[in-house]
Image: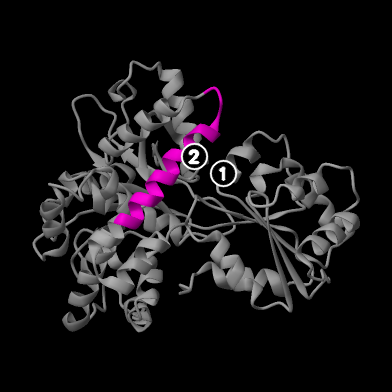
Amino acid sequence: MYIERSIDKALLDWKNRSNHKPLLLRGARQVGKSTAVRHLGEQFEHYIEANFEKNAALETLFTSNLKIDEIVSGIGSIYNTPIISGKTLLFLDEVQLCPQAIHNLWFFKEDMPDLHVVAAGSLLELTLKEMPSFGVGRIRSLYLYPLSFDEFLVATGRSMWIDAKRQASPSKPLIQALHEPLTQAFRTFLMTGGMPASVVAWIETKDYLVCQEELQDIADSYYDDFGKYNKKVSSDLLRDVLRSVVMQIGNKFVYSQVEGNYSIYEVKKALTLLCHAGLIYKVQHTAANGLPLGAEINKKFQKYIILDSGILLYLLNMEANGAQEIKQDILTATAADLVNKGSLTEMVAGLELIKYNNTKCRPELFYWVNTDKGTTSEVDYILSRDMKVLPMEVKSGTSGKMKSLRLFMQKKQLTRAIRCSMENFSRLENDGIDIIPLYAISNI
């Protein structure tokens, strides 16, 4: 089954542009890149999926100093499909295996500007980092992530709920009859995660164990890829660092907690590679005295989150003895202890912020911690909205005193903040704090 994705519109817009550039579709393995391109291919008279992993002859075409028209003619012959500008979509998949093909994307724009060319690859980012330049200004990039909660609602046949919650606000809460099922759907989403294979498994079986089997296959494929990342970084180091990220979710990352007696330099290098592969995202500390938030980063304070909640639960081994407890906490209305179980809700809130960002650029996440001696205040996310700093605190249940959030507002002289929780939309008028349900982060 095809799951409708938000990026479909961006891909269709790219197709219909008269001055389109060759396109790089970027994202981690198995987030749905190839499937989205195949769906786009249905809009063309002809479609070619040239996979460098499945057909080694393709690399020869790009490494033989052939002109673009000769390369295109060769691909058309291999796949016995005409390549006609405006009528054919040419998809170069697993393109990271042939850096020369990435380089040649530059010349598609110059020599065959009307031809629609898309390239993607599971470890594309690692290859791009090793290239001094890959056509800035000549190539367009779009970024794809696991499904957002809104996409999950569409996939499960509840798209009308999206319109309803987007029309709601702190001054106009949802009716309770809709708030409660949305809350339950969000708890399901925490369990399944947003990896397409897991979501499809849930739709077809409504069985979390089947979802876990799909997530296990995905996690295994990530581990299998470690040997391809960098010959100078061992698979054991990458595995140990990823395991440490999982155990430190929601907290400042401490290098010394990585098992294996690695140096800080080795751990930092592994973290960088895992970020480039899209398996983890960095959350950086900002002083947040103004915009841009990235102008005041303190590199001594950094968090890391995993790309998907379902993957996190699998890596935590929650499908075994601890599975029943975490499932009960997630799926019941009194889940007040989720933050202490891997900071799952805080992580998912950050992932949602990433997924609803502009698909044309890679977003950054920031948080704030009070660096004054003897203090422990922390705000989960610092956003930039309407050219102003906007703090956002995340709570897993329906309670919380928000001392850190109020302190931050006082220090920065802010009059508006957001608290995300399992509560319905509301507003604390005296504090200037809007309460937004975790299921409605797309409203932000």
Which residue in the structure is indicated by mark 2? Answer: 225
Q: Residues within 10 Å of mark 1 (few under 14, many from 20)?
A: many
Horizontal and vertical percent position of residue 72: 84, 59
Judging depth in this view, the residue of 245 and 40 nearest the camera is 40
Q: Quick check: 298 left or right of 411?
A: right
Judging depth in this view, the residue of 244 and 90 nearest the camera is 90
Q: Which mark is residue 123?
A: 1
At a point 37% along the width and 68% down the height, the residue shown is: 200
Q: For numbered disc 2, what is the local secondary structure?
A: helix
Which quadrant of the figure contains the C terminus? bottom left
At a point 46% along the width and 60% down the height, the residue shown is: 386
Q: Amino acid at mark 1?
A: Leu
- Residue stretch in magenta: 213-232
CB atoms of marks 2 and 1 within 8 Å = yes
Q: Amino acid at mark 2?
A: Asp
Above or below residue 319? Residue 367 is: above
Which quadrant of the figure contains the N terminus? bottom left
Judging depth in this view, the residue of 63 and 109 nearest the camera is 63
